[in-house]
Amino acid sequence: MESLGKGIRALVKFIGYLGMASVVAIMLIMTVDVILRYFFNKPFLWSFDAVEYIMVLCVFFGIGYTEMNNGHVNITMVYDYFPSWIKPFVNVLNHLIMLFIGVLMTWQGYVLMADSYRVHRVSTGAVKIPEWPVDASIVIGGAAFCLMVLVKIYDDLRPAKTKNA
């Protein structure tokens, strides 16, 4: 099971790096667009829509990576006062809630992606960019997040199993 966890962590890391690369892509597109607009009066027709879509990819590809690195917001005001034997149960409960939200997000992303593909939904800008690949990033990022939370649940339960064995 540890090798599966390592594989999931590597996958989540790769998807997170794609999300990071998308930030660089946004920066480059906007920089070149500004240069073309103000110096040559020839901006990209597709830059606004593309950057909007890449932002979706950036967010959803980053949530699993953020979870892997414990980067999500934690409120520990009450948690710090719990006895040490309760904290693992609170962690599992927290991760189960996160998993529920992640599954809902991934499922709704799939519903949106399937609908976008079925009706051939495109952007409203000058260049008609299909929306379903962007919606697919919600599914991919959500699935990576769910897998990472499952690994965290396993990690939370593993010490309890070794103590009882």
Image (tube, rainbow, N blue to C red):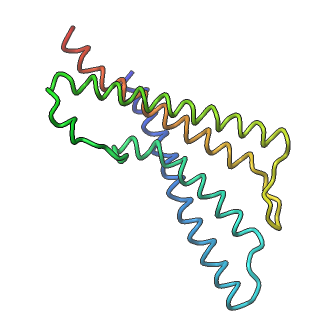
Residue 44 % position (x, y): 74, 75
**Residue furthest toward the right?**
119
Quarter holding residue 156: top left
Residue 20 sits above or below residue 61 on the image: below
Quarter holding residue 95: top left
Residue 85 sits above or below residue 41 on the image: above
Q: Kindly identify the residue that appears in the image at 26 percent across and 14 percent down.
A: 161
Horizontal placement of 2 versus 109: left or right?
left
| Quadrant location of the C terminus in the rendered image | top left
Horizontal placement of 18 versus 149: left or right?
right
Residue 119 % position (x, y): 85, 42
Residue 125 sits above or below residue 69 on the image: below
Quarter holding residue 158: top left
Horizontal placement of 71 versus 127: left or right?
left
Q: For this rendering, which residue is in front, 11 or 148? A: 148
Q: Count the numbered circles shown.
A: 0
Q: Kindly identify the residue that appears in the image at 79 percent across and 65 percent down.
A: 125
Residue 112 % position (x, y): 71, 39
Residue 129 visible to the viewer:
yes
**Residue furthest toward the front?**
78
Q: Kindly identify the residue that appears in the image at 62 percent across and 38 percent down.
A: 139
| Quadrant location of the N terminus in the rendered image | top left
Residue 57 % position (x, y): 59, 52
Residue 7 visible to the viewer:
no
Q: Kindly identify the residue that appears in the image at 59 percent across and 58 percent down.
A: 55
**Residue furthest toward the bottom?**
39
